[in-house]
Amino acid sequence: MPASLPTLSPAELARYSRHIQLGELGVEGQRKLAAARVLVVGAGGLGSPAALYLAAAGVCTLGIADFDRVAAHNLQRQLLHDDTTIGEAKVASAARRLRATNPFVNVVGHGDGVTAANALALFAGYDVIVDGTDNFASRYLNNDAAFFARKPLVFGSVFKFEGQVAVFDPARGGPCYRCLFPESPAAGSVPGCGEAGVLGALCGVIGSLQALETIKLITGIGEPLLGRLLTCDALAQRFQTLTLAHDPHCPLCGTIPSIHDLGARATPANCGAHASEFSMNLSDCPIELSVTEAKRLLDMAPDRTVLIDVREPHEVEICRIAGAEHIPLQQIPAHLEILPKEKHLLIHCHHGGRSMRATEFLRAHGFTAVSNVAGGIEAWATQIDTGLLRY
Ligand SMILES: [Zn+2]
């Protein structure tokens, strides 16, 4: 934050008068906001309310990092975007909306999103990082990069009816995300919100709380959620605050760390890359293939390969891959005797989580030539057949 705070114009004093009337915040707090640079990672369910409130609150520079494009199934919760922006880059759609909310804010779009290669340089340009991402790979990357860049990270997550918020800032004391969960779960082992569902209005609650914590950090008012995790059970409508301790054995911020840089790591874009060493030997099939590899195999050896869709019937009605056999996940055990062991079974679902469970189940029951299709029909729709409806 700059040593001298900017002076507010009469138009700004009028715009922010309801903030300024708050004695704890006042003109000085508003001037701190007018000097602050905040990066919101992910212009989605959490990033939408967070960025809208931060723009309205008058931060100096608001960065939005997201590589994705607006899709119809985003609009149930991602209020930065609307029906007219479907197909547009999220950063462009978000920037237009945020500039319209408050022309005093300098909105900067980062269309590559956050990657291991750009994270440190990107974070260095901001005072506070708001994590609005929805997958573990991004969450760990944001945590690690914020730690190395010595920037506070305002964490938020939603899953079905539950939400969490915390502030991680080991440089000023307290734990990081890895103090709680040292390692990322294996890809496909935990369903994402795309598979499990998420209540749109809950994103509004959690993203708004992230904006609130960010404003508190910038202005210095109140008690930030440092070393505390706020949890929200939307169905019971119950909030709880748990104390989080710094773990001296944390692989990142502990006394003898094992993580020293952002290094090579799986990101949502390259999760399936390892499967490129694919071999046609049926006893040596990789447990997971990318959609490109699955497509190549189906084209090359259609008589020796079976594509199985384990999604629910209502999902198949939205979109399906031509030629796929539909067996809902629950019915896989009943098909053990029927499925051909001499063929290579390629299992897909929506994002790759349920199909990984089916793959592991079949392998545990004597099938050796079974591979999960990484990223599921969602990856197929973005990389193989862009005409498929996404949801
Ligand atoms: Zn830690």
Image (cartoon, rainbow, N blue to C red):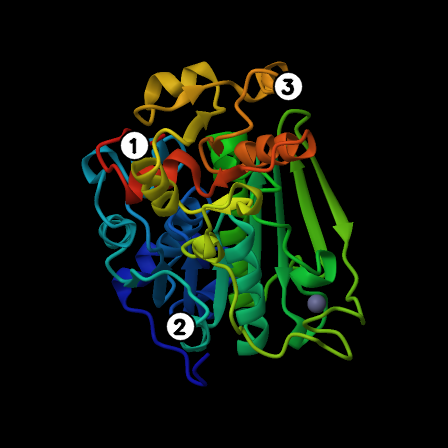
Give x and y (percent) for residue 295.
Answer: 33, 40
Question: Ligand 1 near label 1 (Cβ, under 8 Å)?
Answer: no
Q: Residue at x 79, y 66 (%)?
A: 247
For disc 1, the neighbor class at 10 Å (few under 14, some 14 to 19, many from 20) is some
Question: Ligand 1 near label 2 (Cβ, under 8 Å)?
Answer: no
For disc 2, the neighbor class at 10 Å (few under 14, some 14 to 19, many from 20) is few
- Can you see residue 309? yes
Q: Which quadrant would residue 118 be assigned to in this image?
A: bottom left
Q: Which residue is mark 3?
A: 333
Residue 297 as seen in the image, left or right of residue 156: left
* Pointer 3 with pointer 1, Cβ within 8 A: no
**What kind of residue is marked 1?**
Ala
- Taking 150 as reference, is 359 above or below it? above
**What kind of residue is marked 3?**
Pro
Q: Which mark is residue 118?
A: 2
Q: Which quadrant would residue 78 be assigned to in this image?
A: top left
Residue 125 as seen in the image, left or right of residue 206: left
* Pointer 3 with pointer 2, Cβ within 8 A: no
* Pointer 2 with pointer 1, Cβ within 8 A: no
